[in-house]
Image (cartoon, rainbow, N blue to C red):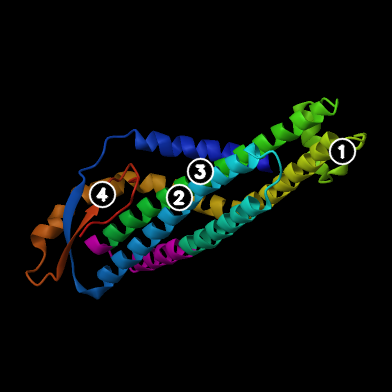
Amino acid sequence: SLNLTKDRLAALQADIAAQSDDEDMPEDVAVPVEGSFMEDFFNEVEEIRIMIDKIQANVEEVKKKHSAILSAPQSDEKTKQELEDLMADIKKTANRVRGKLKGIEQNIEQEEQTNKSNADLRIRKTQHSALSRKFVEVMTEYNRTQTDYRERCKGRIQRQLEITGRATTNEELEEMLEQGNSAVFTQGIIMETQQAKQTLADIEARHADIIKLENSIRELHDMFMDMAMLVESQGEMIDRIEYHVEHAMDYVQTATQDTKKALKYQSKARRVSTTGRLSN
């Protein structure tokens, strides 16, 4: 249910916030990368980071559209279409990110089954963990944005009903929304004045917005919970990841002289970077 989703989001966000309060790890560690495999991996990491940044930017645009729609005296179809386009783009990009993160996770699991344990694998696990956490943070914010907008739409309906002389409690309003039929809101409204007609149109428009929102939240729910569980399961690995990052210099000192490229990577094991950027 939507309430369970909201509770789940709150709990997950609290976990992320708690981890953000921990002390930062050393920011930069030079790590040599041999062969094209790790270069390809870091290219994929950069691609995923760019997609997560794109989702984050779109979420900010969604917030602006929400405010514009709610502040408009009448329903603006152009703005609503722009909002729907943004939501479709977020869904498409989020599914791509999820697929790529899943692919990295499966490769890591396969290598672990062969009992391989090397610096490259540790680097990939650390990067995968950071990207997964960042992705869940961004999607948490998107879910919060949607549920907040639902509450604001609901408040707008409640105020419009009051204008017509029909006071409703929050519980009554939720029961009406569950029925999914605008008629339950508008029954008894006398359509004699232009104001009454506009009020009716506004109530129907907000109700339609809520239905679309609920569909969107449900569509992303399974993906979100899947990623949230992944991030939670990584929590028990944090101490081991922290240890490996601190000792990454061991790999630098023992690397052979034919190392093709040294990459600097952000290594904050207990906190997801706000940008997730890798610097060459």
- Specify the label residue 267 is tagged with: 4
Which of pointers 4 and 3 lies earlier in the amino acid sequence? Answer: 3
Instruction: Give the residue at the far front of this rendering.
Output: 194
Q: Earlier in the sequence, mark 2 or mark 1?
A: 2
Q: Which residue is mark 1?
A: 186
Q: Where on the picture, by quarter, is residue 189? A: top right
Q: Secondary structure at mark 4?
A: loop
**Contact (Cβ within 8 Å) of mark 3 with mark 1:** no
Residue at numbered disc 2? 56
The amino acid beneath tag 1 is Thr
**In the image, which is nearer the foreground, mark 2 or mark 3?**
2
Foreground mark, 4 or 3?
3
Horizontal arrangement in the rendering, residue 203 relative to residue 126 (left or right): right
- Which stretch is magenta? 99-120
Which residue is nearer to you in this view: 60 or 225? 60
- In front: mark 4 or mark 2? 2
